[in-house]
Image (tube, rainbow, N blue to C red):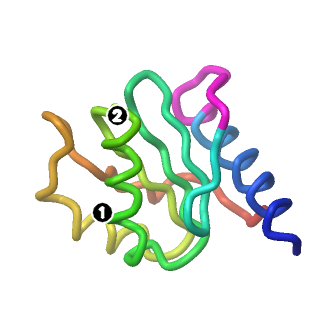
Amino acid sequence: MDPQRRGQLLGIKLRALVSDHVGRVIEAEPVPLLGGSALVDADAAWVLVDADACCLLGASLAWAIRHGATALNVVADAGGGTVADDAAGLQLSDQRVVHRRSNIATDGC
């Protein structure tokens, strides 16, 4: 699949997942981020990882800081629990960096 098209699909998926999680329509435009997609909503960064989640925690954290987020939520189909465990002690401002996201229904793009 064309990488640009893949990025668009991941952005659509991320916006839908975040909207479902927070219970309202998300207006923020997702942007491509290293094999995934990212957006900021209400000071919280959301990153959908479409690759090995463990390898993208640093990039996700840097992106969140650059965009003024006070929290970072990483959504991953595979490896998300490992990322949540690895990031348990990290902090972005006064909030936890990664929240365990085991209950998000994903069935590919």
**Coordinates of residue 33 in the picture (x, y in percent):** 56, 58
Q: Which residue is mark 2?
A: 69
Q: Residues within 10 Å of mark 1 (few under 14, many from 20)?
A: many
Is residue 107 positioned above or below 47 on the image? below
Q: Residues within 10 Å of mark 2 (few under 14, many from 20)?
A: many
Residue 37 horizontal side relative to residue 84, left or right: right
| Residue 44 location, quadrant | top left
Residue 27 horizontal side relative to residue 67, left or right: right
Identify the residue at the far front of this view.
Answer: 66
Is residue 30 positioned above or below 1 on the image? above
Which quadrant does the N terminus fall into?
A: bottom right
Residue 23 in the magenta stretch? The answer is yes
The boundaries of the magenta stretch are 19-29
Residue 92 horizontal side relative to residue 74, left or right: left
Which quadrant does the C terminus fall into?
A: bottom right
Q: Which mark is residue 105?
A: none
| Element marked by disc 1 | helix
**Coordinates of residue 108 in the picture (x, y in percent):** 74, 66
Please state which of the two labelled residues, at mark 1 or mark 2, is closer to the viewer.
2
| Element marked by disc 2 | loop
By secondary structure, the bulk of the magenta-drawn segment is best described as loop
Instruction: Tell me the distance, in whole angstroms, between the alpha carbons under discs 1 and 2.
Output: 18 Å
Is residue 69 positioned above or below 76 on the image? above
Residue at horizontal 67 percent and vertical 33 percent from the top: 29
Amino acid carrying mark 1 in the image? Ala
Amino acid carrying mark 2 in the image? Ala
Residue 48 in the magenta stretch? The answer is no
Q: Which mark is residue 84?
A: 1
